Image (cartoon, grey):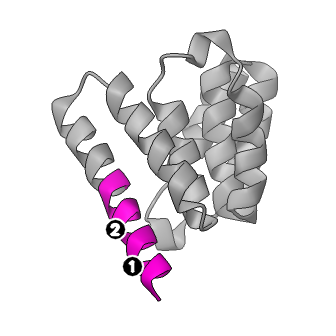
Amino acid sequence: MHRRIDTRARYSSERVRDDDTDWARIASLYDTLARLTPSPVIELNRAVAIAMARGPAAGLELVDALMSEPSLRKYHLLPSVRGDLLAKLGRADEARVELERAASLTRNGRERELLLARAAALSGHQLSHDAT
């Protein structure tokens, strides 16, 4: 129990500002946390940290492995993260679908608006990209 608390405390202390964040260290802490307290949500968070440390393709590989996880089927953050990673990889159409799916799953109205706005921005980006 104390190891889990210590790992979480170290993780929290690493999260200062995005530009000061040591994502490789956070990914390493998530590796430890996943071993101590395995859960699909921790694995999703680990995927985000790995994406930030090693690039969106590395994170997407882990997220894709979670897509069949029953406990995450209605968890809006799974398609939200996947959509974000797909967008970073330039896969706008797939990203838009995931963000729209995330919007349909969230119960938070403001979050839904944000997700739909991000999806719409990707549609606009794709259209302007196709026009050139």
Mark number for residue 5?
Answer: none
Residue nearest the observer in this picture, 32 or 66 = 66
Mark 2 = which residue?
124
Q: Of the numbered discs in the image, which one, if any, rests on residue 128?
A: 1
Which quadrant of the structure image shows residue 123? bottom left
Residue drawn at the location 71% of the way across and 20% of the way down: 68
Is 121 part of what is drawn in magenta? Answer: yes
Above or below: residue 123 compared with residue 27: below
Secondary structure, mark 2, is helix
Q: Nearer the viewer, residue 75 or 8?
A: 75
Q: For residue 34, what is the image quadrant?
A: top right
- Based on the picture, tell me whether residue 18 belongs to the magenta stretch: no
Magenta stretch: dominant SS? helix
Q: Amino acid at mark 1?
A: Ser
Identity of the residue drawn at 79% across and 34% down: 32
Q: Residues within 10 Å of mark 1 (few under 14, many from 20)?
A: few
Q: Nearer the viewer, residue 100 or 108?
A: 100
Query: What stretch of residues is rendered in magenta?
Result: 119-132
Dot 2 alpha-carbon crowd within 10 angstroms: few under 14, some 14 to 19, many 20 or more: few
User: Can the viewer see residue 115?
Assistant: yes
